[in-house]
Image: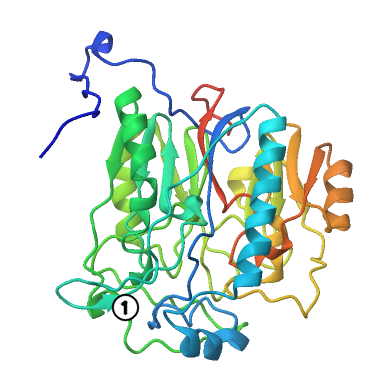
Amino acid sequence: MTTENVPPVKPYMSGVSADRPESPVCSYTEWDPLEEVIVGIVDDASFPSWHMALPPVLPGNHHETFRRNAGKPFPPEQVAAARAELEEFVHILEGEGVTVRRPEPIPQRTAYTTLDWTSTGMYAAMPRDAILVVGDDIIECPMAWRSRYYENLAYRPLLKEYFRGGAKWTAGPKPELTDAQFDQDWTDPGEDGPQRLVVTEFEPTFDAADFTRCGRDIIAQKSNVTNDFGIEWLRRHLGDEYRIHVFEFKDSHPMHIDATLVPMAPGKLLIHPERVPEVPELFKGWDVMAAPEPVIPDSHPLYMTSKWINMNILMLDEQRVIVERQDEPMIAAMKKFGFTPIPCNFRNFNSFGGSFHCATVDVRRRGTLQSYF
């Protein structure tokens, strides 16, 4: 094995700060001034291998599409359109003074096998799902979809760089994702039915996008990818400096909190008008705005999300917010709520299951650890 061109790792001893440089990774909130961010890529984007974890969160009209196209590439014209929008997004971020990093493409249609199952991949488009940054700790998440088992490899070159620069680098327990992890008797509760989640408590799993950070307080939800076991693992890992609050919303198919409840700045909260019929007591005294009705046409394909992906905005600081260029009601609402919207075309990227928040993970925001409640 060669070690040529591999920079040495500086030794780090707990409590000996001189041995550890200032971390290039540091982010405590969703709104402190953004300095560096990872933006995803759609290279080789593919329909995932079909698995029972998919129906609980896919729009019903796309179940057959996913069954029929499992392991095949997404339509090339849609990938190209989404890639062009990502480049526009990167250009806007850099113009606003943000350093942008990108993951490395990895093969998504190469089959891989564990002791129990075989799958292909999906994409590296949504770093917000795969990586959670809390302070100077950059955490690889133990995700529940088999098609995302090796997704973190796309970020490994960056993770190694950040670690060598002084960041903490953690990986959650690598899940087995055997059949025991999924409720084999799961049935769809319907839009108005009681919440029934497909993941069991067999082992800890969670996506980073089921957590939103407000300094010392982190808001979480259980979902079809995040279980109590995963939330408890994160709570113990972070320790007493942080408080994790778990809320349940009126959502019978939950997956990711960032199109349901979005803290935008201290004292400012954006909510889904149907999923959040009652604002949690924790946010008492905050100004609350219900998101306007989305304007995405019915004809536009949304393979893995609802139209409420319009809530998936990205704060650059306590004033500037990235919003979809064609979503005029959201742009107007943001102005009325006291923010400065920065429009960016992103509707074609929305087709792949996310928007500006999903497509990014903040590496560094300029701020300190505070309490906001």
Q: Which residue is mark 1?
A: 182
The amino acid beneath tag 1 is Phe
Quarter of the N terminus within the rendering? top left
**Residue pictured at 85% horizontal, 49% vertical:** 331
- The picture places residue 4, in percent across and down from the top left corner, at 19, 29
Residue in the foreground of this view, choosing between 258 and 87: 87
The chosen color scheme is rainbow
Q: Residues within 10 Å of mark 1 (few under 14, many from 20)?
A: many
Q: Classify 293 as above or below 340.
A: below
Q: Is residue 7 left or right of residue 349?
A: left
Quarter of the image for residue 163 reads: top left
Q: Name the residue rendered at 38%, 72% in the picture.
A: 109
In this view, 109 is above or below 215: below
- Number of marks present in the image shown: 1
Taking depth in this image into account, of 320 and 212 the one nearest to the observer is 320
Residue drawn at (21%, 67%), measured in percent from left and top?
Answer: 176
Name the quadrant containing residue 274: bottom right
45 in relation to 172, above or below: below
In the displayed structure image, the side of residue 202 where residue 215 appears, left or right? right
Residue at (62, 57) in percent of width and height: 83
Image coordinates of residue 149 in percent, x first then y, are: 32, 63
**Is residue 349 visible in the rendered structure shown here?**
no
Quadrant, the C terminus: top right
